[in-house]
Image (cartoon, rainbow, N blue to C red):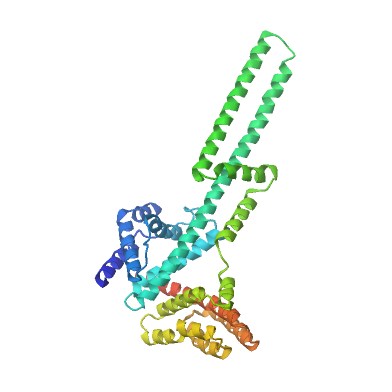
Amino acid sequence: MEISLTKNINEVKKIFNHKDFNEKNFRKFSIIIKSEDTKFHFTNLINNFFDIIDFKPKPDEIKIKKFISLYTIKFYPQIMNIDKSISSSRELIQSVTLMDMIFKSILKNYDKLNLKESITLFHKKFKMYIKNFDIWKRIDIEGLIITLIINHIELEEQFNDNKLYYENMIESETNENSESKKEYIEYIQENLDILTKTFEEEKKSIMRKIISLDKEKGPIKFEKYYKLLKDDGIDKDTVISGVTEIVNENISINFWSDFKKDISKEEPDFTKLEDTILELKHYIYNCIPNKKEIHLHIDNLLDLEYIKSKIVNKVFNNYDLQGYFAFIIEKLKEYQPPNFDEETNIFEKELNDLFLKNGDLEVILAFFFSYVTPKFAEIVNLRNKFFSMLNK
């Protein structure tokens, strides 16, 4: 397994280190990203990861392609039609940044990390990335459908204007019965017939495109969005914004709100706590991959089973928490860049205020992890960028 893992990691590293695997030239980049070799090596490595944590089923070809496409999103967001004004696009970009960072930190430090823990985190974030990708794609498709319906409405308005123009011309000429007038009316009618036929063909073409985007609900969506855009006069951006909100409400979750609810249940659900601790440990390890003694201290400090037992038995008090948090905040201050200092000081003061007010356990935990986890993630990202620059 070790030989296979090392070999697969080195093959993927070669892809990352290729002179054209960057944002400089899309044509050259796309040759690499679409190659069978790239798909083959990424598939082997990710399957290797899933073997290590003994997880099944392994990702299928579609999910592997979605994973590889995160680098197209990272380097060429404009080509992927990423609109940062839409929340689903912003969440996808955050997921891309996080996924890339975790993946590369494993490739770089796999022999220094707790590999199973790191790959378990990779697996969780892999699922989240695929979910965010599917949400973004779904909203992107909705945007295309809405654009096609707007094209239909504009075409319809032009047709109605032209139709009215030709009909008025015919009506104004019908009072005269001369042969030349009859020929002229026939000519106008011919043009009107051609216009009507062209309009009907364009309508069918637009509907075919809508159905190709959504075979099951295309016609229903046409009626729904047509009414909103045409009859109710709502603009495109408002409709897309509404669609985004609906999709996010139906699919996504407020993580930290659920985090608090899950811990405060009569029988606590620790899934999100487990995920959060696993993620935080991974980032701290990657800030100092060679400091095994600190890794060990963090393992003891963030012993999940011990923390869970104290929560279940209701013996986890604020004094315990302050001891846990003090060391982690100390390490955050040690590793963070100077521009984080002011924000971290404000966070620490607000955290101490929560302790002084004897805040609820689940509120304090959510407040702490929601700040320090993304901060350590940013530090790892900055560290990786720095070493990447040195290697160029």
Q: Please report the residue visible at 55 percent of the width from the left and 62 percent of the height from the top.
A: 252
Q: Looking at the image, which is closer to me, 386 or 261? A: 261
Where, by quadrant of the figure, is residue 389 drawn? bottom left
Where, by quadrant of the figure, is residue 247 drawn? bottom right
- Whether residue 108 is visible here, answered yes or no, is yes
159 over 122 or under it: above or below: above
Give how far across and how far down residue 222 sits, in percent: 59, 42
Give how far across and how far down residue 89 sits, in percent: 53, 59
| Residue at the far front in the pictured view | 267
Q: Locate the C terminus by quadrant.
A: bottom left
219 over 363 or under it: above or below: above
Q: Is residue 313 left or right of residue 175?
A: left
Give how far across and how far down residue 387 sits, in percent: 38, 73
Q: Please report the residue visible at 57 percent of the width from the left and 26 percent of the height from the top.
A: 197
Give how far across and how far down residue 320 sits, in percent: 54, 89
Q: Is residue 133 left or right of residue 32?
A: right
| Residue at the far top in the pictured view | 179
Q: Locate the N terminus by quadrant.
A: bottom left
- Whether residue 84 is visible here, answered yes or no, is no
